[in-house]
Image: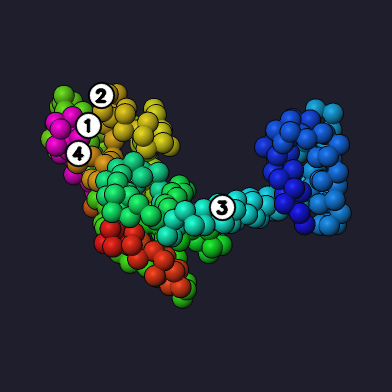
Amino acid sequence: MESEQIEAFLAVCQTKNFTKAAELLHVAQSTVTTRIKLLEERMSKRLFERNNRMVELTPAGLKFLPFAQRIQELMNEGERIVRSEGLFEGSIVFGSLQSLWEHVFPPIITSFRKEQPKIALRTITGHSNDIVQKMMDGFIDIGVVYIPPHHHEIEVIPFFEDTIHLFAHQTFTVNKEPILADDFNNLPYIHMNWGSPFTEWYMKSLGDIIYALHVDNSSLFVKMILSGEGIGFLPEYIAKEHVRNKQLKKLPFTPIHPIPKRPAYIIYPKRKKAKIEPLLSFLM
């Protein structure tokens, strides 16, 4: 299996068209066709169903896709490390969630870069399961996740506990205090799923609420709350700066069941402790 075959496979997956895949790769369409044919022969399976208008993955192709993506990522990372040899004293790949990159890590990364300019740092964004999988593949050196793995080769260290509360713009007023679960259908509630264990708490305590807006991007969600479009649940680590700046306020909400805390964990392969130690000291 050659890297060009993996590259062609992923390009066809992305464009769903052999001609567009060839344009993306700057090669002839016949070259893409040949590479896919050779890959399918090696697999002894058809990876794509072809028609005049669209190309779709077969069940075999769908199964192969995540492995092809991981193979390409590892090849790219290997190339990056080799090309940077001699330019830096070391390199660290750091993976975590988007909301943490935006609200927790910027000052840590800035301080780290000032003190360790000879260490190349690469950041990767993904969900907890993505970070763990990339770490098991050898692609990520250290990560911060909410759902830690249970693996004898992975070190797990508690990082911080994330508390979630109901917040609104500073000018928002409530007709009665405290806010109860039954009041939510009469409030401009915007929903954001902050993952387990918040998901389980929400379904148990407020699952029958009919909300008009469900947002799945933390940056957009925070902007909406800041603009006064509605109220919503926010982790304390995101809200605290806006509360300090008198942009947001915590609402007097009394839940039926206490909102559970969500712990975050630092994880890294035990064999890489020496490699990640410079960054680990900044996180700890």
| Residue 220 on the magenta segment | no
Q: Earlier in the sequence, mark 4 or mark 2?
A: 2
Colour convention: rainbow
Q: Which residue is mark 2?
A: 228
Of residue 81 and residue 271, the one placed in the foreground of this image is: 81
Q: Nearer the viewer, residue 220 or 117?
A: 117
Q: Closer to the observer: label 4 or label 1?
A: 4
> Label 3 to label 1, Cα distance in Å?
49 Å
- Element marked by disc 4: helix
Q: Amino acid at mark 1?
A: Ala
Q: Earlier in the sequence, mark 4 or mark 3?
A: 3
- Do labels 1 and 2 touch, CB within 8 Å? yes
Secondary structure of the residue carrying numbered label 1: strand
Mark 3 — residue?
A: 83
Residue, disc 1: 168
Residue plotted at (80% across, 40% down): 32
